[in-house]
Image: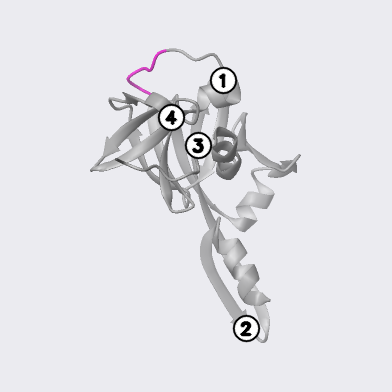
Amino acid sequence: MISSIINLVSATLSGCVLIKNNKVNIILEMTIIIFKVGEKLFGLSSTEVVEVLPILELSTAGENAGKYDAVFNLRGEIIPVLNLKKRIGAAVMSFKIWNNILVVEYSQAKYGLIVDKVIDVITFDQEYKNADLNWTRLDKTDIFNWGQSIVTMLDLKNVLKKSKVTQKMEVV
């Protein structure tokens, strides 16, 4: 029972577990990458992000255009790319020099997510999460206050599932 709780928690947060007098105390720390897509701010747990890159030269997706928007070569590995503006229904414009690609890992595969700009990386513990950020769950989506803005946590699984890109790419 305890090990399944620990595995569930460690899937999205990092920290340590202290067991003292048969009581489990979990000290959690979470790092979130905050980025902008259109006029909205989103966040992703750093455990889901492999790296953040400047916008790169992208190749067309060819016959896979329905699944993803482009591909790029990352040190010999072909990475499918999704433009998050398209996925959230924002106006799609040409890419700018300040755009970023978040390379994420899901189900043992890497994907690129085009975002307008990475704004910040914040780290906080569970206590801070509950007290200062006004963390809330609405319709299965986590949102929180960050300064004067609201940040919506991106559900990576949902984004990739809706895009139908979770099938392994085969290079012929």
Residue 37 visible, this angle = no
Q: Judge whether residue 77 is colored magenta.
A: no
**Mark 3 closeness class: few <14, some 14–19, many ≥20 residues within 10 Å:** many
Nearest to viewer (mark 2 / mark 1): 1
Q: Is mark 3 on a helix, strand or loop?
A: strand
Q: In which quarter of the image is the N terminus?
A: bottom right
The disc, 2 or 4, on the residue closer to the chain's N-terminal end is 2
Nearest to viewer (mark 1 / mark 4): 4
Label total for image = 4
**Observer-nearest of 110 and 118:** 110
Nearest to viewer (mark 4 / mark 3): 4
Quarter of the image holding residue 114? top left
Mark 2 lies on residue = 20
CA distance separating discs 4 and 3? 29 Å
The disc, 2 or 1, on the residue closer to the chain's N-terminal end is 2
> Bounds of the magenta span?
94-99
Amino acid type assigned to the residue bearing label 2 in the image: Lys
Mark 1 lies on residue = 39
Instruction: In the rendered view, tell whether residue 65 sits above or below residue 171.
Output: above
**Observer-nearest of 30 and 76:** 76
CA distance separating discs 1 and 4? 28 Å
**Mark 4 closeness class: few <14, some 14–19, many ≥20 residues within 10 Å:** some
CA distance separating discs 2 and 1? 47 Å
Amino acid type assigned to the residue bearing label 4 in the image: Asn
Tag 4 near tag 3, CB within 8 Å: no
Amino acid type assigned to the residue bearing label 3 in the image: Ile
Q: Residue 34 carries which label?
A: 3
Q: Is mark 1 on a helix, strand or loop?
A: loop
**Observer-nearest of 15 and 4:** 4
